[in-house]
Amino acid sequence: MKRKLSVFAILAAAVVICTLPGAWAAGNTAPIVQKNCMKCHQGFGKMENVIAGNLGGKSEKANSIQMKVNNRMEMIKLTPETEISNVPDIKSLKSGMAMRVHYETKGSDRVAKKIVVKPKIKVPPEQLITVKELAKLVEMGPEKGAYTLVDSRPGPGYLKGHIPTAISIPFPKMKEMMGKLPKEKDRMVIFYCQGYR
C-alpha cells in the first residue's frame, strides 16, 4: 500500500512539475518587446498581451508567425479573425518587418487578435533636406538661418553627441515638449533621428 501511495505521489508531482510552467506562461500577460523598440515606444512596456519585434517567419500551413524578439523566437497562431494594419493582408508580411502583435492566450497558445505592422514613412521630396543644405544652415546658425533643428532620438543619444545647434525633443515626449518648437509659422523646423527601422 505504501509503495502504491509513493508511486502515486511521484506521478502527481511529475504532472504538477510538467503542467505548471505552461500554466504560469499562459497566465503571464507582460509584454514581450524588442529592446530597441522600447527606445521610442516606452508605452509598449505598459501594454498587456503584446509582442513587439520583427517577423522571423510565417507558415501558412500551420497558420502561425514567428516573431524575433531579443534573439528569441516567439510563436503566435493566426485565425481568420486576426486583424492586420498597414499592409493589405497576412500574405503581405515579409521576414524582418517590424510589428506589434496583440494576442490572447487560448490554452498554451498565443492567438493573434491584431497585427500592427510599422508603417512606411513617406516624406514628400520637397520636405527633405540634404546633408549639404543642413551643414550650410548650421554654419549660419538658427537665427540667421531661420531654422530650428530637433534631435528626436531618446535623450541618451542626444547626450552622446548631436548636430550643433540641435535641441532635444525625444519622440516619445514630443506631445509634452511641443512648447520648445517655434511659434512662428514661417520658421523651418528640421527633425532628425537615428534612422527608421
Image: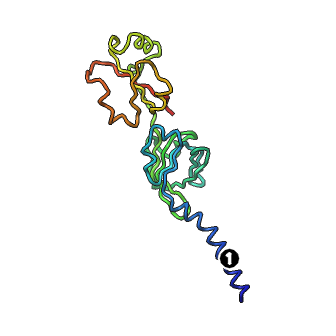
Q: Residue furthest left?
A: 184
Give the total number of marks visible in the rendering: 1
* Crowding at mark 1 (Cα within 10 Å: few <14, some 14-19, many 20+): few
Residue furthest right as drawn: 3
- Where is residue 37 drawn, in percent x and y? 50, 40
Amino acid on which the number 1 mark rests in the picture: Leu
Quadrant of the image for the N terminus?
bottom right
Q: Residue at 29% across / 30% down in the picture?
A: 179
- 20 w.r.t. 98: above or below: below
Residue 57 horizontal side relative to residue 194, left or right: right
Q: Is residue 37 above or below residue 80?
A: above
115 in relation to 3, above or below: above
- Determine whether, in the image, residue 61 is placed left or right of residue 167: right
Residue 18, image x, y percentages: 64, 67
Classify 4 as above or below 88.
below
Is residue 70 toward the left or the right of residue 88 in the image?
right
In this figure, which residue is indicated by the disc labeled 1?
11
